[in-house]
Image (cartoon, helix red, strand yellow):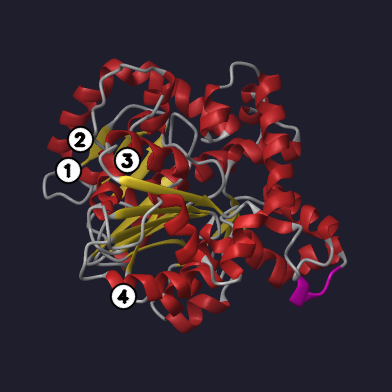
Amino acid sequence: MYTYRANQKAIYNSFCSPYVTAILGQRRVGKTTLVQHYITKHPEHKWVSFNLDHRSEREQIIDGQLKKMIIQSAVQNIGEGEPLWVVVDEAQKCPELFEQIKILYDHYKDQNAIKFVLTGSGSLELHRLSAESLAGRIELFSLREFSLHETVLLQNPGIENQQVSMLDTLLTGSIHEHIDTILHKLTPQQKLLEQALSHHLQWGGLPEVITADTTEKRISYLSNYLQTYLEKDIRDLETISDIWLFQQLIKVSAEQTGSIRDDKKIIEALSCSRNTLKKYRGILQATLVYQEIFPFIASTVKRVVKSPKGYLSNNGLISYLSGIHELEVLKATSIIGHRFENWFLNELRVWLDRKIEHTEIYYWRTHTGSEVDFVVEIAPQILPFEVTYARTVSSKKIKNLLKFMALEPKAKAGFVIYNGEYRYDRNNGIYYLPAWAIG
């Protein structure tokens, strides 16, 4: 059964444009399901599909046969019958694809003869290839693992889809009034959203893991997921000469999720060169398994030489790799804080994927130790977030928020994401937001 996705409207609108549509996201987040849902809703179109996980199809495209493949699958010439809708899954696996799409796009663009929809689980590679061959011809979208709201819809078919996000209110002129309205709408689903949050901290937001009904099934799926990732995305890469080292880097990234990256310690632990670490970490990022956020500094040059925070993108993989998944065990340690940050980072990215403005996510830290977990830039606004799993917030976190707000005039308010009740500190301009209502 298909479940509503937060940015499906923008993606489906792109399907109706003449441009090439590309959907990026790590394996198994639902890219193909989203496309297939559109296909079932539009049987009037003539669809042709390829999956470049299949070596035989890659080899044909490497030989320059994309046009012939389309014609034979459609049983008609391009431009001589119905318009053709061509879907290509795992497009990043065949660099030769993009130049051939460019040629077909340019030849038929004024004839309404062919529409391309691409999916890919290799963000940087697909960005690079499309930028080189399809500049001005492509619209790029991201699909993440499920948010809290999407998780509740997946677990409870038929429940009302509120289609609201508390994060949207933070950009309005009357935040307090809008939050009250959204909380009123979401209160009937509060228990379901709280349960979804606990699931995300333990198991992440991959749909098959969400719908699994036992711990054993979740662990088995995550084990197979990681093996498939290594076999289909990594093992064939010529740049990976040591698959064991690559696996160890994944484990280290899981252990250090939410921490400032310390390359010296990682190099010593893995006994590898700095260049190898840089290359392997770049592949983790390119395949959307790992992400980094850099410090909030006015100077871009200074920012990129500072150490970022690193996050393995999925809490479920962290549970599988660390062997720690019981919620009570997580609560009893500092681990829960890093899992909570990781969950909220995904919620931020799901939210920002729907924005047409340029957006960035940073963290803020001073040499004296003052820190704000996330700083979101949506020009011209700056939104600072402190994130804590607790039901109460330490005075230190509030002082850090106030210090940042005093230094950054674009930050008109501060926000705390926690497990307590909603309240608004009007004197300091700080909003305390319940985590369950974020998604």
- In the structure shown, which secondary structural element does the residue marked by tag 2 occupy? helix
Looking at the rendered image, the disc whose residue lies closer to the viewer, 4 or 1, is 4
Label 4 – label 1 distance at C-alpha: 50 Å
User: Quick check: can you spot residue 116?
Assistant: yes
Q: Mark 1 points at which residue?
A: 175
Disc on res. 51? none
Q: Are marks 2 and 1 in contact (CB under 8 Å)?
A: yes
Specify start and end residues of the magenta stretch as a single range: 272-276
Q: Mark 4 points at which residue?
A: 107
In the figure, residue 277 lies in which quadrant?
bottom right
Tell me which label, 3 or 2, sits earlier in the chain: 3
Q: Mark 2 points at which residue?
A: 179
Nearest the eye: 299 or 31: 31
Horizontal relation, residue 350 to residue 41: left or right: right
Residue type at mark 1 is Ile
Residue 182 image offset from top left, x and y in percent: 20, 30
- In the structure shown, which secondary structural element does the residue marked by tag 3 occupy? loop
- In the structure shown, which secondary structural element does the residue marked by tag 4 occupy? helix
Badge 2: few (under 14), some or many (20 or more) residues near its Cα, within 10 Å?
Answer: many
Magenta: main secondary structure equals helix
Tell me which label, 4 or 3, sits earlier in the chain: 3
Q: Name the outermost residue toward the right.
A: 271
**Residue 118 on the magenta span:** no
Residue type at mark 4 is His
Residue 318 image offset from top left, x and y in percent: 67, 41
Q: Which residue is painted at 32% across and 36% down in the image?
A: 433
Disc on res. 6? 3
